[in-house]
Amino acid sequence: MTDYVFRPVAPADLPLLAEWLDKAHVRRWWGEPADALASIEEHLRDPRVEPYMVMLDGGDFAYIQMADLDAEDDAALDGQPEGTCGIDQFIGVETLLGKGHGPAFMRGFCRQLFERGKSRVLVDPHPDNISAIRAYAKAGFQRLGETNTNYGRALLMALDRQENDRQ
């Protein structure tokens, strides 16, 4: 089993994140790199969002963030159980795409969230983002259905603590 390390994003990580956000495979789903980077930079000061670098064999290769959704003001997320959080992530190192790292590090990250008491982890990929949807399904996420969030069209998918405990 591969060991992934999740370390909090530091201001020194922003140039690498800017480089990754400018790559076509990331930019397609994360939008304008400068805007996405500004958002990540804001997360460094927002206690409701936790941004992390994902490390493999001592090197950074991906980004993941967790947002506490209990106080989120988005009608599309109404009805979620207390203790729900959302995650967003991408692999920045292109040579590591398509090798199973996404589902694997998401499982490890979700396991840590459940150990911290979270009851549900939500993801909201765009319905056209087939590779992300496939990765989420491999990580154990179940489809809840399509909706429109504050950020646009999305396929809501969830992983609940008890389902994660069986993996």
Image (cartoon, grey):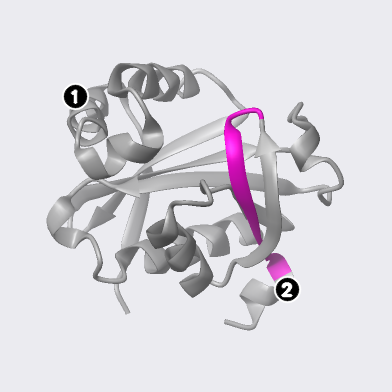
Q: How many marks?
A: 2
Quadrant location, the C terminus: bottom right
Identity of the residue drawn at 50% across and 63% down: 136
| Secondary structure beneath label 1 | helix
Neighbor class of circle 2 (other Cα within 10 Å; few <14, some 14-19, many 20+) is few
Relative image position of residue 117 (x, y in whole percent): 71, 55
Disc ID at residue 62: none
> Quarter-wise, where is residue 131 in the image?
bottom left
> Quarter-wise, where is residue 105 in the image?
bottom left
| Secondary structure beneath label 2 | helix
Q: Are marks 1 and 2 in contact (CB under 8 Å)?
A: no
- Amino acid at dot 2: Gln
Disc ID at residue 15: 1
Relative image position of residue 122 (x, y in whole percent): 64, 52
Magenta-drawn segment: 150-161
- Amino acid at dot 1: Pro
Disc ID at residue 162: 2
Relative image position of residue 139 (x, y in whole percent): 49, 70
In this orientation, does residue 57 appear? no
Q: Tell me which label, 1 or 2, sits earlier in the chain.
A: 1
Main SS, magenta residues: strand
Above/below status of 90 relative to 106: above
Above/below status of 15 relative to 9: above
Neighbor class of circle 1 (other Cα within 10 Å; few <14, some 14-19, many 20+) is few
How far, Cα to Cα, is label 1 from label 2? 38 Å
Q: In the figure, is residue 109 to the left or right of 165? A: left
Relative image position of residue 50 (x, y in whole percent): 51, 35
Identity of the residue drawn at 37% across and 17% down: 35
Q: Nearer the viewer, residue 64 or 24?
A: 24
